[in-house]
Image (cartoon, coloured by chain):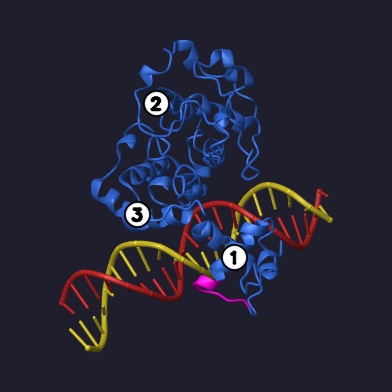
Chain colours: A blue, B yellow, C red
Amino acid sequence: MVRAPCCEKMGLKRGPWTPEEDQILISYVQKYGHSNWRALPKQAGLQRCGKSCRLRWVNYLRPDIKRGNFSKEEEETIIKLHEVLGNRWSAIASRLPGRTDNEIKNVWHTHLLKRLKQNGESKSQQHIRIPDCHLNDNKLSQSANSTVPFLSGCKSIEDAQMSPQPSSSDHSSITDTSETNNTGLIKVENIDSSEIYPVIDEDFWSEPEMVENSGMPSSSFLDDSQFPFPSPDTVEPAGCNGYGPKVDDNMGFWYNLFIKSGGIEELPVQYLQRYNYLADERI
DNA sequence: AACTCGGACAACCGCACTTAT
DNA sequence: CATAAGTGCGGTTGTCCGAGT
């Protein structure tokens, strides 16, 4: 599809924003909102393209932006989430209130990457198979070629798991195993799954009946009564935020798996090992 | 004091995806 | 269904500034 440039370059200003421009943008957004970024600069009297305005607002002017250095807790959270999500900066940012994807991306490249390289592989990588694309800082889309069905297509899984946090008035949609500490971070610490999850018998690990041509287990395998994890009733499905993929039948399985396991870090290692085993057998 | 280098961060670019027509 | 428009995301670049020489 042929597309027009994101903005007309002629006559539009680029580069650093001035305090005057910031004030105009803030005033306009506070007064009229930002339902249409493309039209906003014209209506606000800014010589900028809509994209530039949106970026400035989202990354700098938004009232809920938390400025200043990252705390140790925040850095640890970023590292842990990156182990699972890779370079999905917006998904990571959604778990760090007040921080932007751009900011996190910068911190990652300027601080954390170096630290990780010094420290070597992280602890959780010993337990969960992470695709190379995550560890090598490449595009996550490469994971579509992963030999691990669990992670092939993880873009959608993450969108399901990492959909933006609900507002403070909408706690009902937070998975009941997520909790915030006094720093405002979402806890992703490793926990001993044996303390939380029921004992899983041999039947649970039996090979699921597969849906033809889908590579995914049949719906009976997803039956709540057969699933020994907490109910996902309080969690909204992926795509509910209006962005990201819709939940199809296959992704629904992985979505349920993630949610029922209580979160990324808390997904029982046995399940991953079992599914990786089954996946390898099918290849 | 002048210059170089590298870190930090803001901003831009192009692509992908969703939505509207 | 096809296409255009709008938006979000991740990668990359540009710029500023402080430390070191």
Q: Are marks 1 and 2 in contact (CB under 8 Å)?
A: no
What x and y, as percent, mark residue A50?
63, 65
Residue A214 makes an appearance in the image: no
What x and y, as percent, mark residue A48?
61, 71
Q: Amino acid at mark 2?
A: Val
Please name which of the two marks, 1 or 2, marks the residue nearer to the observer: 1
Give the total of numbered labels. 3
Q: Specify the principal SS of the magenta part.
A: loop
Marks 2 and 3, how far apart at CA: 34 Å
Q: Dot 1 surroundings within 10 Å: few (below 14), some, or many (20 or more)?
A: many
The answer to whether marks 1 and 2 sit on the same chain is yes
Instruction: Give the chain of mark 3.
Output: A
Q: Amino acid at mark 3?
A: Asn
The tag earlier along the polypeptide, 3 or 1, is 1
Residue under pointer 3: A69
Circle on res. A25: 1
From this view, report whether residue A112 is shown above or below residue A55.
Answer: above
Q: Amino acid at mark 1?
A: Leu
Please name which of the two marks, 3 or 1, marks the residue nearer to the observer: 1
SS assignment at label 1:
helix
Residue under pointer 2: A269
Q: Dot 3 surroundings within 10 Å: few (below 14), some, or many (20 or more)?
A: few
Name the quadrant containing residue A31. bottom right
Instruction: Give the chain of mark 2.
Output: A
Marks 3 and 1, how far apart at CA: 25 Å
| A226 and A276: which is toward the camera | A226
Name the quadrant containing residue A126. top left
